[in-house]
């Protein structure tokens, strides 16, 4: 702990002996900023796909493999964040996606944000599935309904009946691959499982169901107490695997032990003061880097053994803030119980309560230091990109509108209204730094998990995964995610107004924005609408890709010509070549868009427009390569030549 904080806390403790019994009841975090949280929420909202409802995990990543990827765990914490901000519609979209894909086999760890297909990692682990169940229960508590509780019950029962059990604990997975997941028992996963079985036992529909969840809860509590808890050292280990006890000390096993199991449970079942666990975490996990304090995901000895540099884990720091808030609430309740009969003891409880709320506020401030200092955007890059696309749509429909075409005029008006509202928001915020979490340019900051590095383009720094860290920045001080509607009473949640345009103003179905506001999302919208026969939307999306990204595509055409000389040869299973092709994403997307436009105009007998598109494709973007969902690459320029230019002479006349 820094000297300046130690001095402050010493003075603070002296003052607390006299004043805290009444002060504890009135204390509240003063570092919450509704304006700042609104910016974070606004940024997170823009990461949600309009088609699947999934939230982008690795925003602005330069790693092609991580583009358009949605971590299942990230969806759960983003959904809880949406619930907190009163945006029930966005949380519902996430749950609708997962409800529609439940097949009694479990959810994979990643899905494609745009298509909803399986993502880069198709392993099925207990943890992410259990977090979707937590989101489902939170949703029903927030809205006072029973809409998704059946899904939560299905998930937890599936875990109980499918995952291998040993000594009362549940395995991390039920399918082995290169890792024997049936033999891996994660403390984190078992803590999740305990929290959910406890909730479902308390809200059981029948005595049989209550007994079932009670048995599972007792079993996993026994595993936590007898297998991974070291009574002599007073620590909880990371888990158990085929090599025996995994004695790695992980931050989330400490923070979640307190928030998920409760401080009372930790005290009664493990015989350890939860405050001592926090002190241990502060001693072993807390680090300072670039004048920022936060928590690493493993302790000092682990970093020394592995030889890795110590890092600040943003999501884990948010989880520790959550733990501080849980302990704050716990000590407030103890103060209320004891203040009449045991005022001296109550005074100590009040002192602890304010100590924990101070720590929560302190680390919130540390997280907020991570605003991007080297880059400044209007609100954030996604908002600027949204504005650019919407302006294009407005211009496009304004050109097509005339006095007899009410539909086009309404569409133009619709986009003009969006532009007006975005500009209003921009003018209110003027030039602001990004949300403070997703775009930190500092090296040695992690926000996802060990081994996941998402480098931004042309940089060696770590690009944090945005969704989980951003969501935890909002969640951490407001709600215990392991308790349905477990809002912290000391925190005042700002009400966020969500911009919506009334549907009754339109004389047509509102034209929704593309599935993802980037070149790949726009191109996906173009192909989908082309295949479904909606040529108007297909043309719009393809025009946006060609117009907005043509400069980037021309640059990548030049780079590819210098580096590869020709199209990149690929065979099935050649992942290295596949990654190289995907590296030229804007070139591939613009080439594909020009082919779509050429095809649309040809079918409409607009031969001049068709020829100009094919000509631009063949002369300027001929190294573009497009991935076919059936499993191969094709070259749009070659297809334009062989399928149109060589066959139909009228195109060149």
Image (tube, rainbow, N blue to C red):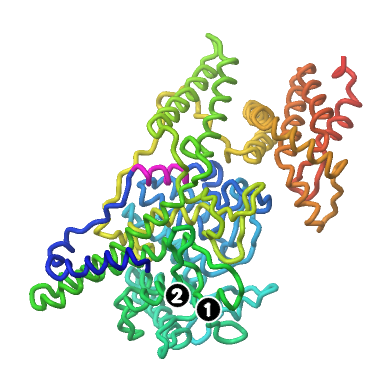
Residue drawn at point x = 56 percent, y = 56 percent: 443
In magenta segment, residue 239: no
Quadrant of residue 652 within the rendered picture = top right
Q: Magenta region's main secondary structure? A: helix
Q: Position of residue 501 (x, y in %)?
A: 41, 30
* Residue 41 falls within the magenta-colored stretch: yes
Name which residue lies at 78% across and 36% down.
Answer: 557
State the separation of the CA atoms marked 2 and 1. Answer: 8 Å
Horizontal side of residue 143 vs 447, given as left or right: left
Q: Position of residue 510 (x, y in %)?
A: 50, 29
**Nearer to us in this view, 133 or 582:** 582
| Left or right side of 425 for 603 | right
Which residue is nearer to you in this view: 632 or 372? 372
Q: Which residue is mark 1?
A: 301
- Residue range in magenta is 35-44
Q: How packed is label 1: few (under 14 Cα within 10 Å), some, or many (20 or more)?
A: few
Q: Earlier in the sequence, mark 2 or mark 1?
A: 2
Task: Give the SS element for disc 2.
Answer: helix
Task: Note whether residue 477 is visible.
Answer: yes
User: Which residue in the protein does label 2 denote?
Assistant: 284
Residue contact between numbered discs 2 and 1, judged by CB atoms under 8 Å: yes
**Residue 356 located left or right of residue 123:** left
Locate residue 401: give its quadrant. Answer: top right
Crowd around label 2: few <14 · some 14–19 · many ≥20 (10 Å): some
Q: Write the residue at 81% across / 21% down.
A: 611
Is label 1 in a helix, a strand or a loop? helix
Q: Locate residue 52, reporting x and y percent.
A: 55, 46
* Residue 117 at least partly seen: no
* Labelled disc at residue 113: none
């Amino acid at each position: 702990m820094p000297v300046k904080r130690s001095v402050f806390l010493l003075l603070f403790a002296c003052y607390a002996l006299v004043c805290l019994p009444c002060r504890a009841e009135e204390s509240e975090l003063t570092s919450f900023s509704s304006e700042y949280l609104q910016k974070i929420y606004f940024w997170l909202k823009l990461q949600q796909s309009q088609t699947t409802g999934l939230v982008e995990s690795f925003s602005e990543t330069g790693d092609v493999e991580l583009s358009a990827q949605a971590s299942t765990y990230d969806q759960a914490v983003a959904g809880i964040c949406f619930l907190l901000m009163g945006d029930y519609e966005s949380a519902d979209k996430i749950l609708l996606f997962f409800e529609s894909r439940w097949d009694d086999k479990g959810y994979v760890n990643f899905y494609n944000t745009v298509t909803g297909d399986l993502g880069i990692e198709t392993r099925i682990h207990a943890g992410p599935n259990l977090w979707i169940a937590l989101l489902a229960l939170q949703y029903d508590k927030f809205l006072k309904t029973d809409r998704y509780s059946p899904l939560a019950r299905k998930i937890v029962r599936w875990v109980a009946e499918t995952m291998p059990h040993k000594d009362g604990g549940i395995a991390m997975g039920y399918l082995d691959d290169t890792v024997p997941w049936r033999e891996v028992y994660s403390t984190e996963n078992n803590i999740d499982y305990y929290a959910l079985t406890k909730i479902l036992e308390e809200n059981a529909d029948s005595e049989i169901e209550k007994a079932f969840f009670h048995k599972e809860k007792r079993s996993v509590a026994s595993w936590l107490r007898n297998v991974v808890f070291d009574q002599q050292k007073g620590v909880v280990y990371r888990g158990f695997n085929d090599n025996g006890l995994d004695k790695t000390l992980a931050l989330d096993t400490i923070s979640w032990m307190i928030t998920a199991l409760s401080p009372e449970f930790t005290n009664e079942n493990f015989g350890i003061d939860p405050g001592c666990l926090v002190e241990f975490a502060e001693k072993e996990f807390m680090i300072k880097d670039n004048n920022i304090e936060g928590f690493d995901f493993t302790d000092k000895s682990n970093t020394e053994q592995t030889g890795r540099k110590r890092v600040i884990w943003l999501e884990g720091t948010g989880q520790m803030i959550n733990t501080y808030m849980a302990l704050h609430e716990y000590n407030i309740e103890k103060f209320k119980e004891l203040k009449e009969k045991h005022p001296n003891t109550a005074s100590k409880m009040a002192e602890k309560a304010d100590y924990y709320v101070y720590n929560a506020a302190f680390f919130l401030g540390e997280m907020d230091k991570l605003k991007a200092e080297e880059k400044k955007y209007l609100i954030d890059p996604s908002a600027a990109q949204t504005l650019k696309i919407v302006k294009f749509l407005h211009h496009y429909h304004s050109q097509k509108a005339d006095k007899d075409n009410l539909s086009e005029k309404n569409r133009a008006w619709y986009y003009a209204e969006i532009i007006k509202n975005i500009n209003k928001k921009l003018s209110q915020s003027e030039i602001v730094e990004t949300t403070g979490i997703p775009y930190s340019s500092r090296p040695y900051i992690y926000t996802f998990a060990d081994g996941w590095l998402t480098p931004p383009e042309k940089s060696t720094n770590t690009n944090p995964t945005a969704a989980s860290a951003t969501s935890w920045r909002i969640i951490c001080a407001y709600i215990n995610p392991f308790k349905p509607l477990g809002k912290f009473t000391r925190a005042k949640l700002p009400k966020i107004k969500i911009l919506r345009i009334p549907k009754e103003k339109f004389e047509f179905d509102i034209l929704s924005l593309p599935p993802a506001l980037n070149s790949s999302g726009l191109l996906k919208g173009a192909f989908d609408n082309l295949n479904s026969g909606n040529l108007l939307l297909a043309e719009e999306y393809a025009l946006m890709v060609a117009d907005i990204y043509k400069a980037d595509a021309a640059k990548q055409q030049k780079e590819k010509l210098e580096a590869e000389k020709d199209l990149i040869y690929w065979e099935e299973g050649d992942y290295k070549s596949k990654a190289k092709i995907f590296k030229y994403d804007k070139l591939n997307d613009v080439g594909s868009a020009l082919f779509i436009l050429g095809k649309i105009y040809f079918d409409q007998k607009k031969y001049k427009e068709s020829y100009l598109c094919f000509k631009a494709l063949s002369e300027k973007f001929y190294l573009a390569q497009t991935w076919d969902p059936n499993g191969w690459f094709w070259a749009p320029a070659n297809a334009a030549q062989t399928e149109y230019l060589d066959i139909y002479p009228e195109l060149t006349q």
